[in-house]
Amino acid sequence: MIRIGDFSKLSCVSVKTLRYYDEMGLLKPVAVDRSTGYRLYEYSQLSLLNRILALKELGFSLEDIGRLLDDGLSLEQMRGMLKLRQVEARQRVCDETERLARIESRLRQMEQENNMSKYDVLIKKVQAVKAASVRAVVPTPPDQGALWGELEGYLALHRIRPNGTCFTLYHDEDYKERDWDLEVCEPIDGELPESQRIKVKTLPAVTMACAIHNGPFDTLNEAYNAIIKWLDSNGYRIVGPCREVYLNPAKNGSQADPETVTEIQFPVEKI
Amino acid sequence: MIRIGDFSKLSCVSVKTLRYYDEMGLLKPVAVDRSTGYRLYEYSQLSLLNRILALKELGFSLEDIGRLLDDGLSLEQMRGMLKLRQVEARQRVCDETERLARIESRLRQMEQENNMSKYDVLIKKVQAVKAASVRAVVPTPPDQGALWGELEGYLALHRIRPNGTCFTLYHDEDYKERDWDLEVCEPIDGELPESQRIKVKTLPAVTMACAIHNGPFDTLNEAYNAIIKWLDSNGYRIVGPCREVYLNPAKNGSQADPETVTEIQFPVEKI
DNA sequence: ATACACCTTCCAGCAACAGGAGAGTCAAGA
DNA sequence: TCTTGACTCTCCTGTTGCTGGAAGGTGTAT
């Protein structure tokens, strides 16, 4: 029988930790002195402690370990739990690798440009959204105003109020000087009949690379460039039409408000 | 100006988190209604929030982010902090990869043997230790008794008391039937003169793969086998003589006490 | 006797929030 | 105009695996 300090030295586990394991019921000392409260351990408990530490290194929480040690665990159960840990560990390796890649991308970018980008690109999952839309080919993006008018008019006619932020889908895969294939969209909730021009569709949930642009539309291309570059540098591929989300609803008719805030979203997948 | 719920939806950040960032001083709403206490945000604050999230993904703590945003950070400082994150991220990738390897090794082992090993192998760093020792070649390990007598006698003569657990170093690289080159060691604190037979040396700190054996010495080889197998399966290499550490001091003269607890330690390095 | 190392319990703190209680606020429908 | 339901507020607790410290009792070597 040895006291906690010696047990701590032999096992290379701090006294605090041993007391904590006692409290958690993981490793009780074989005896506790009635009068002094001193914990007394046996040398043979070192192997149990070793088992606890080994399980901890495999990624089990102390609670899990407690259950594993208490229950006479069947081999199958143990295998199941290990498989779970395996999946989690794989995920973490993946996450950390990606984080590392982003840091390195950022460092490279700083080397090249000698300043920090105005734009921060984020990967996020956007939910599925039901929207009414009009799709058409227009000479240049600023010419989409008429389409908005058409869509709003139709919604007002059917007494449907949009319930989200409106956006434009750009269907062209490559940059074009003229004749843009785009689709203006307004999220809605209820039922709306379609017409020749107005369609209602549910866009599925997707993973998006996003950046936010503050200011007038005429500098929006900077945001596009920043995202495209980020995607290239971080190993993502564009897998669908990009969205231009108009965050602050233009009350005065989508004119060049200096306070305009726009989010660019590209559906992507990891290469 | 929008309320926290809408800001939350636009940014995909929970209301709780936004309030927390406010409290931390990371992202203050542009206004707080005097009478109701409602937080009011601007659309343009979304880009700041995006920046916060981007930095968070790079591995910065909220405290770091706060400083980064407050101070007009020089490019050099930023680079330094990123380099730090890079090192940490590398370390974590490494750790998680190793954890994954261990889980998979454990799973393989369960497949093969259809039971859980009695032994749990742990990697730990043992500190440097100063010890008095006698090295000799003896026919078989149980013949080391005389060496222990010699060492203890010498220590007693010089009024030096051992201050740790004694152990034996096995210097042979391969298994031998007869004639083992071993060294019995007793950790000491003070100064001790050497003699023809008794040496005093400081063993440097090393990384060890350890397992604990409960019971008599005649089954110790099971523990050795378990460690060797684990090392092979987890990608470690033995880089020095192994230690057999006698955890509970034999009071009655190192006889076969059934309560004996022994730790086997192999100095190793990752392949 | 006294110093000093060791042991005890209890409480606080970490990081980045999530959950919930209890109370006040706002806008739309009856 | 009233009510209902959705929002919002602050404040408190809990999460994980410990570490650090305070206040007080114990054991032993000189």
Image (tube, coloured by chain):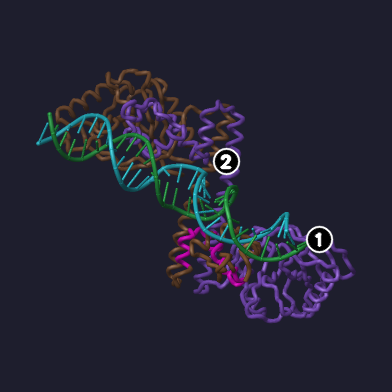
Chain colours: A brown, B purple, C cyan, D green
Crowd class of label 2 (few under 14; some 14 to 19; many from 20; radius 10 Å): some
Q: Chain of mark 1?
A: B
B157 lies left or right of A244: right
User: In the rendered image of this protein, does residue B147 appear above or below residue A209?
Assistant: below
Task: Check disc 2 and report its element: helix, strand or loop.
Answer: helix
Residue B33 part of the magenta-drawn span:
no
Task: Check disc 1 and report its element: helix, strand or loop.
Answer: loop
Instruction: Find disc 2 in the rendering and name its residue.
Output: B85
Identify the image quadrant of the N terminus of chain B: top left
Q: Which residues are magenta?
A: A41-68
**Label 1 in the same subunit as label 2:** yes
Q: Tell me the tag on residue B190.
A: 1
Query: Could you say which is closer to the camera, residue B199 or residue A215?
Result: B199
Quadrant housing residue A219: top left
Query: Could you say which is closer to the camera, residue A47 or residue B108?
Result: A47
User: In the rendered image of this protein, does residue A136 appear above or below residue B130?
Assistant: above
Give x and y (percent) for residue B19.
39, 36
